[in-house]
Amino acid sequence: MSICKKLLIYILYLLSLIWINYLNLPQKVESGDISFLPLLAPVSRFILTLLLIQTIIFIASSLLSSKYPLTISAFINLILVLINQNIFPYNNIFTPSTIITIIFIVGSLLIEKKYKNKCKSKINKIAFALPLLALSAFLFSSNSSLQEKQQNIVIIGIDALRPDFLGINDTQPSITPNIDKFLTNSTFYTDVTTPLARTYPAWVSILTGLYGTNTHARFNLMPKGMVDRQHNLQNTLKEKGYTTIYAIDERRFNNIDESYGFDYVVGPKIGAADFVLASISDIPIVNLTCLTSAGEYIFPYSCNNRAKHSTYIPKNFVDSVMRTIKANADKPLFISTHFTLPHWPFRYSQLEIPQGRKFDEKKPNHFFYMAMLQAVDKQFQYFVDQLNNAGVLENALVIVLSDHGEGFMLDQDKLNKGIEGVSFKTNAMGHGTNILSLEQYQVVLGIQKFEKSSQGIVKTTPVSLIDIAPTIYDYLNITPDYKPEGKALSWQEGGIEEDSERFLFIESSLSVESMNSSRLDAIKVMMQGIHYYTTTKEGLVTIKPELIDETIAAKQRGVIYKDWLLAMFPDMTDNMIMVNRKSKIWWPLTHYKEENMAPWREMLDALCTHYKNDTGFDKYQLCQKFSGS
């Protein structure tokens, strides 16, 4: 065997070995600093994987022609670029990543010209078989069928889904017919709030039945060690024999993983590298590999990743989730899924014009948001169909919800002042940015026992996402080892009406000025907020622990009672805001008239009691001032 052959086989072996072992390089990170060291391992693995694939292409080309293998390799790369552009038409062909591919092509041609006489012999077929054997372990999917299971629990979350944009709420023509149909056949709650309008804190409350004041999940990207990861549905159900699965297609701001009690987590790999590789991995080889079931193992940060919006295919993510579900048919299933298509940047690989909607150049994101609702509606139905075909929905409890709404500063979302001569910002873009933007905190909730034909119950009592976990515990007749703050909902026919004499709490999250633009700039948002974050030795992005008390002190806080909202803002020195949520009228609390019938003193007492242990809460002692004590 020639030296050229031996060298090539050795390089293949070395690259395979390095790739399989994930490049476990030292990752020392100084606390409180944004460091790029945790990116070194995943980025290096990504680059070496590309080199490995290119080497495989080269070997295949050598088998076709020992004289011009690199020229054929270059031609194959060019074909991949064209195929990629055909499959992902909204992908910009002149990205920096595509330029890397062009460099591969040009480099191959130059090397061929210089070295074509030095290694003419046909490469040994063993060299071609080696990497194929290494990769073959990934090219499979389970064919096991699900046996009938009792009491499966399925939560389907849809990011940023506003209730008032649904056809069931008389928005016509409907762009969400499949979700509408499900909700029509469910117990549909029309007044549901999220405790915090951000995905991670909302999901922690969904899974625990607790407010962030108890779980300590007060923002996206909280440090793991500060959050209660023990008292939740998944840990409780695991003790009862359930297999627990969490699936989400965008994980940059949501650090929920197996350490929260899940047996399986499906979706792109979590970590700082996700922020980088989702942007730079727009390469034909990567994109086309991600179309296979092996892709999520070969490029874990890139495949089925909503953040890589130009190549994201909704059905592929569902198929990935179903592979995990079908592989775990021997136990009852607790499945929590979250689809993030309606989240910014409101684009994906197969963009379609939303039915019956017109483009408004002043509010472009609003238009594209509706396009995403239309797309996620199809993804939702595809998932339900796949679950049903697999037998998962037989006798299953299915809950459909959203984690938060979305603000676009629409005319329909404005609050009107109750008296003249006052002004206050009551509307905002995004979610979690202003508790007076009611559309950010209103969410969707429908509960259905799937095998039964529901009568379509509608309930108007105010409820919260913290009621989900207690509802599931009640349905399964399970007493958890902790006390949820939420209440079990009476969703079944003949159930009593929910308690309307309760207080529900909401709070804002971390926000930066650039998030209030109708045309979001990702770079501006990142740069304005980057000083709040650090990277851990595990490669995760988290809020700096030393800044958490400061950011909690800056929160807006509110309490809801029936149609009323009482809001406290950290920069208001002598007043609060009272809102009638039904009429969308607001007053300064000092000008609110008793005859309007809101029990503001009781609401104030509840608000002050709930948040009293927060560092920096009520800096100007408004609780004492307005209570009269």
Image (cartoon, rainbow, N blue to C red):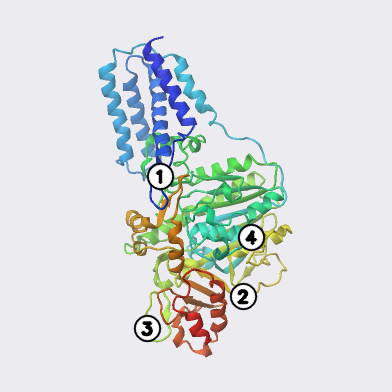
Secondary element under disc 1, as helix, strand or loop, is helix
Residue ID for mark 3: 422
Give the amino acid type for the residue marked by disc 3 in the picture.
Val
22 lies above or below 156: above
Mark 2 vs 3, N-terminal side: 3
| Structural distance between the alpha carbons of marks 2 and 3 | 30 Å
Give the amino acid type for the residue marked by disc 4 in the picture.
Ala
What numbered label is drawn on residue 144?
Answer: none
- Of 277 and 102, the residue lying toward us: 277
Residue ID for mark 4: 469
Q: Are marks 1 and 4 in contact (CB under 8 Å)?
A: no
| Structural distance between the alpha carbons of marks 1 and 2 | 43 Å
Mark 1 vs 2, N-terminal side: 1
Give the amino acid type for the residue marked by disc 1 in the picture.
Ala
Q: Residues within 10 Å of mark 2 (few under 14, many from 20)?
A: some
Secondary element under disc 4, as helix, strand or loop, is helix
Q: Is residue 102 left or right of residue 436?
A: left
102 lies above or below 459: above
Mark 4 vs 3, N-terminal side: 3
Mark 1 vs 4, N-terminal side: 1
**Residue 123 place in picture, x, y as percent:** 40, 14
Question: Which image quarter: residue 209?
Answer: bottom right
197 lies above or below 84: below
Residue ID for mark 2: 502
| Structural distance between the alpha carbons of marks 1 and 4 | 33 Å
Pick out the residue farthest to the top. Answer: 1
Residue ID for mark 1: 278
Residue at point 52%, 36% (across, down): 293
| Structural distance between the alpha carbons of marks 4 and 3 | 41 Å
- Of 554 and 478, the residue lying toward us: 554
**Residue 303 place in picture, x, y as percent:** 46, 41
